Structures are given as structure tokens and as C-alpha cells.
Amino acid sequence: MDGNNSGSAYGADSIVVLEGLKAVRKRPGMYIGSTDTRGLHHLVYEVVDNSIDEAMAGYADQIYVWINEDGSCTVQDDGRGIPTGMHEKGKSALELALTELHAGGKFNKNSYKVSGGLHGVGVSVVNGLSVWLVATIDRDGKRFRQSYHRGIPDGPVEIIGESDRTGTTITFLPDPEIFETVEFDYNTLQNRFRNQAFLNKEVSINFEDKRSGNKETFHYDGGVSEFVQYINRTKSPIHPTPIYLHGKYDYTDASGDNQIDIDIAMQWTSDYSESIVSFVNTISTPEGGTHLAGFRTALTKCFNDFAKDKSFAKGISFEGSDIREGLTAVVSIKIPEPQFEGQTKSKLGNSIAQTAVSSFMMSRLSEYLLENPKVGDIIVRRSVEAYTAREAARKAKETARRKSVFDSNALPGKLADCSDKDPSKCELYIVEGDSAGGSAKQGRDRTFQAILPIRGKILNVEKVRPDKILESAEIKNLVTAIGGGVGGDFDVSKIRYHRIIIMTDADVDGAHIATLLLTLFYRQMKPLIEAGHVYLAMPPLYRVAKGKKEIYCYNDAELAAATQELGQGCNVSRYKGLGEMNPHQLWETTMDPSRRLMKRVQITDAQLADHLFSILMGDAVEPRRDYIVEHAHEVVNLDV
């Protein structure tokens, strides 16, 4: 290599040290996951989690959250208040907590035996990613205050008055230089605070949006048992009262004697899907972890042991999926020194958690089933039905494989495949109707774009047992084309395309077809969505033309701008069907990677997603009617 190339110079002066919170502002995604709306709301979660930690330690029972009219957020608690005295580093403890990464009380077991804060970076990160932040502390009979701009103190901590209360109040304004949006969403925060209140039944979370006037208080004496009933509010439980198990597991490790608090509630419904949400120190763990593994192992063993003496289950060995069909469960543990994967805490890694939950479940659930055999019988009968359906589905798949239906060499006849065989470069367009499918086939780039037309509305998988799904020819074609399998056998590493794009008409029927497809993917191929492989195409709604000039518009605002630009005499076409476009127009507007718009389908809140699929696609009519009435005012475009 040419060592004289100045562009590749790498010496001591190439090493950059980012002091204070500059590292946070330089790489915010490392600390809050992203700078989109999820990262924005993560700021609120970090501050509220500190207040929840005070509550778990027994020092707080009231938390207040306000979204202010200027777009800032205030979080207040009645805990002990962040210490304000001078630290040995020559700064107040408050300033250290707000300006130094890995500084806080979470590393001291005497301050917090259990905490949601792991790395001690939460509130300091919020400070670094805010235009301004003001901390007000009530303790020791005084009120202290310190303000910051983009993480830098405006001055030292000052005493601004006397106080007869204790607690911490943090107000911050997210920085638009960092975030894609700085507008807090009431419903997103509402759902988070509701969950926190379910998991901490001693706490009241008072939430008010001063922009709209919405306000509510979350407090649930029933804890996780009430949480399960809330999740099942639009479902049909097969036993009236959730199974509730609570206790502690003692263990000793290098740090001494420790204890894990375990809170579990379960209730089975007539649904075919399972809904299990898990938490560690009140922090949601959407990817599960060791505590969830322990729960699943013990659940399967307990019910297999219980079923051995039942005449209607003799000779049957249940798999975990048989037991969990229709199950709604909340698994919450509180553990010292949790080991999460990353600051966003999506998965627990402590091996002791698996041992603790499994041992606890084996003891307490077995005891419950002995004391409540009728509930056990109901669940086992439900599991026998799931077992029978699974066996039927397995035999159907074996038959299908023998007929080469799932063989990569026997792809659906309607599929126009691409020539490239590298899945990372390939995309599959699922197109509504043969007419649009024909245009897409002619307009596509055959190298990497495959087209699969579907006829009409596919089967609603929310309403049928899994063994019936492959009886649908359209779904069988989809499963075969995608290549990863279906249901519990789905393997995302075997898919044939890394971009699966739903392309339907811009009308009510098109939206319904897209929803049916998303229901299939969410319930039967969920890793597709979790890995970010599913997209919604965004065909234009309008074409505005005058002379040789034409502009495609995706919403009414763009339409107004285009008509103003082209002036009087322009021709406006409203596209309701993809078939109205010729192949060139479809490529130019919707399929050309350099110009097209697409929406990636993501699961930002699995619990809410599960709830909405149950409401909109399930058997119960009343919850769906109530949802439509409640949200009718949000409708913008409605075909009549």
C-alpha cells in the first residue's frame, strides 16, 4: 500500500475523545435504539423507569407525567429525590447523574436491590438528547434546581426555596436536531404507563396531555392477574379467573444471598394463537430470554404430568405449542443485577432466572392443578384439540411434501419468478388481481423482482385452526413461493426473498386484502415481520397531467401542490386500481427502487398488535363494532 496517501493518514491525532455527553449526541442509536418515534418515546421511558425504581424500592407510590403545551415532558415522583450533595469528584451528585454516563445509584445494591436501570446512562442520555432539561429536587426540607442545554449545565445546583415533600421532577424538551419527530404520541405513552401500573400494583401513574386535555390515572390492585384480564377483554376465556402464581426464589451467588420475585398470571381463551408478554424489573422483554424459557419448559411438563391420569389424554405427549394454544400470560420477574442484551433491554440473559422460574412454576402450578382439577381438565381438553389439529396439519404437510408442493422446484404456476437466486437481492410482489399482476409482470425488472398474483380475499387465519390453513390454495401458493414454511415450522433463514411487498388497490377492498395478508404473516410467519422483510407498496393516488408533463401524487397535499404548479387546464386522474396503470406507469411509480415509496411493516408494540388483530380479524363482533365507532372520526378516505 502507498503509505504517502494523505487520505489514509492514521496517527495519534486521529483518535477523537468525545467528552461528557458528546458521544450520546454523536451516536444516539447506541443508547436509545433509534432516532425515530421509538427513540423519542424511549426518553420518557428512561425517566419514568427511574421513578418506578423508587417505587419498587418502597419509597414512592405516586408518579405524574405531563406532556406540556410546548412539546416538553415532565415526570415527577414522590420518592427520595436524587441526592444533591457534593461528590468526591468535585461535582454535586445531581450533576454527575445528569451529565456522566454510568453514574447513578443502580450500581449500589444498598440503594436499589432491584432496578430497571442497568447501565446508569438513562437520565444522562435524556439530558444529552434534549434542547434543554430542568431537574427540580425536593429533599432535606429544601427545593434544589439545576438546568441544562444539550447536556451542559447552565450553572451549579441552586436552592430555590423550602419544601415539605420529597421527590424528583424532570422536565425536558427533545432535540429536533437529533430526532426525526419530536411530537409525543398520547396512545403510545398511555399503553406503556398502563402496563407499568399493572406490574406495580402499589403505584399510581397519573398521566395528562396538556395539548389535548386528555388525562387518566392508572392503578390496578389486581396486578398481573388484572393485566391478563385486560389483554383478554376482546377474547372469550374458557375459564373465568386467571391462574395467579406469586412468590420468591432464594439463591446465593458471588455477591451473596439474593432473591427473585416472580409474578405470573395465565388464562386460556378460545383463540388459536398464544399471547405471552414478559417483563424484567417492569421492563418489557419482547424477545423473551431465560425467564420465558423457564416458564415454557415448566408449563409443558406440568400439564403433561397432570394429563397422564386423564382418560381423554392417555397416550398423548403434548408439545409446548399444544399447551400454549389460546394462552394469554404475563410473566414478570424482579431480579438483582439483570443481564440484558443492550441498553434497550429486549432480552434477559441471566441463567439463574431460567432455573428460578422453572422451579417455582413446577412447584406452584402443580399445586394449583391439584387444588383446581376442573380448571386443569378444561385446559387439557383444549390442549388435546390442539394436539389433534397439529397432528392433522403434520400429516397434511407430509402429504404435500411427497407431492412436491413445498419443493423449491415445484413453485406455483402463477408465480413469475426472478432470475437471481440470492434472497438478499430478491423481492416478491404479492399483487391483487390478475390484471394488475399482468402489468406488474410486464413492468418489473425480471432480474430480482418476482410477481405472485392472488385472486380475491385470502382466508382469514385468525378465525381458523392452523390445520385448516393449508386447505386454502391461495395461502398454499404464498407459503410455497416464500419458502420458509408456515406456523411453528417457519424458518426465516429459508425464505427465497428478503423483501416481500404487498401491492393492493388504493380502496377499501385493497386495504382488506392487505390486512388479511398481514394477519397471515403475523400469526403464521411472524419472524418475517420481526426481521423487517415485509413491506407495503405505495402506489400513487393521483396523476396530474398537462401537455407532456405529468406529476404523480401520493396524498391530497401533493395533489394541491401539483395542480397549482401545472395551473388551469390540467387533467387529474384518481387511481383506485393498480390495473388502471400500464406496465410502464406501474414500474415508474411503484416498482422502480430508485423512485418508489414503500412502508416497512414493524411490530413496535406486540401486545397492542395482538389486541388489534383479535379485535379486527377475530370472531367477536361487539369489540369490532365498538372499535369502529370509537375511531370513525379518524377516517380520511372512504370509498362509497
Image (cartoon, grey):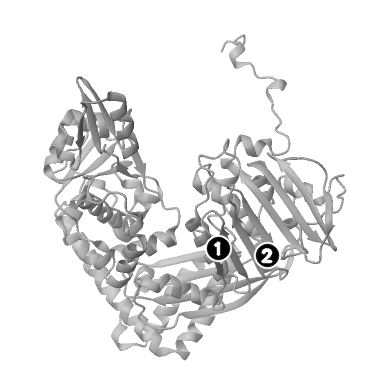
Res 279 → quadrant: bottom right
Report the quarter where the N terminus lies.
top right
Element type where label 2 sits in the image: loop
Q: Nearer the viewer, residue 502 or 279?
A: 502
Mark 1 lies on a secondary structure that is helix
**Residue under label 1:** 193
Residue 555 visible, this orientation: no
Give, as a three-letter code, the residue at label 2. Val
Is residue 281 in sight in this rendering? yes
**Up/down of 441 relative to 526, above or below:** above
Residue matched to label 2: 114
Residue 8 appears in which quarter of the rendering? Answer: top right
Tell whether label 2 touches label 1 (CB within 8 Å). no
Residue 332 drawn at (x, y percent): 55, 68
Kindly give the residue lying farthest to the front in the view shown.
Answer: 568
Relative image position of residue 513 (x, y in whole percent):
22, 52
- Left or right side of 185 for 530: left
Three-letter residue code for mark 1 = Phe
